[in-house]
Amino acid sequence: MAIDPLDTSNRENLSVREVAERFIELFHHQDRVGDAFRAWVHPDYIQHNPNAPSGRDATLAVLEAAVRNNPELTHTVKRVIYGEGDLVAVHHHFRRKIDERGWAVVDILRIKDGYVVEHWDVMQEVPETAKNDNGMF
């Protein structure tokens, strides 16, 4: 039986991995940014990206505006790394428009007590040419 990614019941007993999987399913795979944030992000969320405010609701307002203003926006997950403790890294290909090269992004999430409580990200533009054939993903 598949788990409903909106099921937050018993959140305090969920593992870091279970919380991350539900958040990633809603946010990245289903493109349900608002649902992901309201269900899984703590109201006192700490944001380290200098272009976004801290706090769940303030960050969500910025994200929802970005989605509204960029209807072709995609963020395709390439890999998820579950580290020791409370950190999870999500490596994804972010594009505002389908035909652009976009960015390679790593989001680092800290999860505590069944919530995403903190976020860092690192973004690198995908270049037109590279000095190797390995690709960024």
Image (tube, helix red, strand yellow):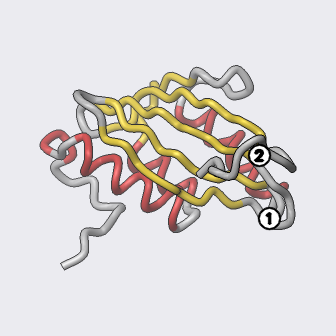
30 vs 5, left or right, is right
Q: Nearer the viewer, residue 5 or 87?
A: 87
The Cα atoms of the two marked residues, 1 and 2, are separated by 20 Å
Q: Position of residue 124 (x, y in %)?
A: 71, 36
Label 1 vs label 2, nearer the camera = 2
2 vs 29, left or right, is left
Q: Position of residue 58 (x, y in %)?
A: 63, 32
Which of the two labelled residues, at mark 1 and mark 2, occupies the earlier sequence position? Answer: 1
- Label 2 neighbour load within 10 Å: few <14, some 14-19, many 20+: some
Q: Residue furthest bottom?
A: 1
- Name the residue type under label 1: Pro
Name the residue beneath numbered marker 1: 71
- Under circle 1, the secondary element is loop
Quarter occupied by residue 33: bottom right
**How many numbered discs, if any?**
2
In which quadrant of the rendered image does the N terminus lie?
Answer: bottom left
- Name the residue type under label 2: Val
113 vs 51, left or right, is left
Q: Nearer the viewer, residue 50 or 87?
A: 87
Query: What residue is drawn where x is 35% and y is 61%?
Result: 6
Q: Does residue 136 sit above or below 72 in this rendering?
A: above
Q: Does residue 119 sit above or below 75 in this rendering?
A: above
Q: Position of residue 107 (x, y in %)?
A: 53, 37
Query: What residue is drawn where x is 56% and y is 24%?
Result: 47
Name the residue beneath numbered marker 2: 126
Quarter occupied by residue 62: top right
Query: What residue is drawn where x is 13% and y is 43%?
Result: 13
Q: Nearer the viewer, residue 11 or 133?
A: 133
83 vs 53, left or right, is left
- Label 1 neighbour load within 10 Å: few <14, some 14-19, many 20+: few
Query: What residue is drawn where x is 58% and y is 50%?
Result: 92
- Under circle 2, the secondary element is loop
